[in-house]
Amino acid sequence: MDKKLVIIPTYNEIENISKIVHAVFALEGGYHILVIDDASPDGTADQVKKMQQSEFPERLHLMERSGKLGLGTAYVAGFRWALERDYDYIFEMDADFSHSPQDLPRLLDKCKQGCDMSVGSRYCNGINVVNWPLGRILISYCASIYVRTVLGFKIFDSTAGFVCYSRKVLESIDLDKVRMKGYGFQIELKYTAYKLGFKIGEVPVIFVNRQEGVSKMSGSIFGEAFWGVLALRFRKFKPAEK
């Protein structure tokens, strides 16, 4: 059986973490989870430790970091951890149920059907977003148009954070050279995979705004993505050295 790891970065997700862990582990297929917690003061990491000890000692893993170091650095740390442990498929997913765990098998199937990387897309089949303010929908949707225009990149939802990577994609990306730390990281990883010749597929999903907890979005995140995309346009890409 393929080894599958779902990476879930957290900061103050005490309302959601137990529910999202149980929802993923209720799926067939033997998924593992790596929670990467950035020193949440609300006790998120402590809750994960309790579940590790009492329920999921083999499948639930925890990485604790010293503070809020950025979404991109969390995923890079998780990717390294996964590659060291021979996982075949590695997923990115939020803790707040904006991404449905029920869609994980659909992302996996897309990769097994011939894609190297699959994206849970809000925009490849219309606009599938629930409970977002109109202004935020417009910003997100226009950001994807901006990326396609500047980079000539045909993915409809380049900022999506619900992704399945086959192992070979992450092995080929030089993780030391990933530069963006916020949501621009999502664009950078997809575009890097594309420039390295990997096939990326999109799976239409419904994105539901978080019901509990607080959003981590900020103006600086959008600023990094805006200028970072321009820089990507002129970057040269080559596979990581083995």
Image (tube, rainbow, N blue to C red):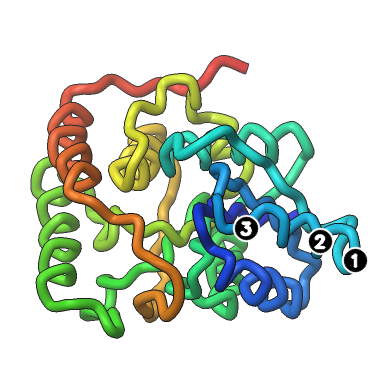
Labels 1 and 2 touching (C-beta < 8 A) = yes
- Distance from label 3 to label 1 (Cα)? 16 Å
Side of 190 where 67 appears, left or right = right
The front one of 233 and 69 is 69
Seen in the image, is 205 located left or right of residue 79?
A: left
Q: Position of residue 124 (x, y in %)?
A: 28, 71
Q: CA distance from mark 1 to mark 2?
A: 6 Å
Q: Percent position (x, y) of residue 57?
A: 89, 57
First-in-chain label (2 vs 3): 3
Q: Which mark is residue 50?
A: 2
Between 152 and 136, the residue placed more toward the observer is: 136
Figure quadrant of residue 80: top right
Percent position of residue 69, x then y: 45, 35
Q: For mark 1, what is the residue?
A: 54
Task: Read off the residue under disc 3.
Answer: 44
Q: Amino acid at mark 2?
A: Lys
| Residue drawn at (58%, 75%) of the image | 101
Q: Is residue 46 left or right of residue 174?
A: right
Report helix, strand or loop for mark 3.
helix
- Tell me which residue sits at (59%, 47%) in the image: 37
Under circle 2, the secondary element is: helix
In the displayed structure image, the side of residue 227 where residue 75 appears, left or right = right
Q: Earlier in the sequence, mark 3 or mark 1?
A: 3
> For the residue labelled by badge 1, is the local secondary structure a helix, a strand or a loop?
helix
> Which residue type carries mark 1?
Ser
Q: How many marks?
A: 3
Q: Amino acid at mark 3?
A: Thr
Q: Residue at x 35, y 76 (%)?
A: 209
The relative height of residue 204 versus residue 157 in the rendered view (above or below) is below
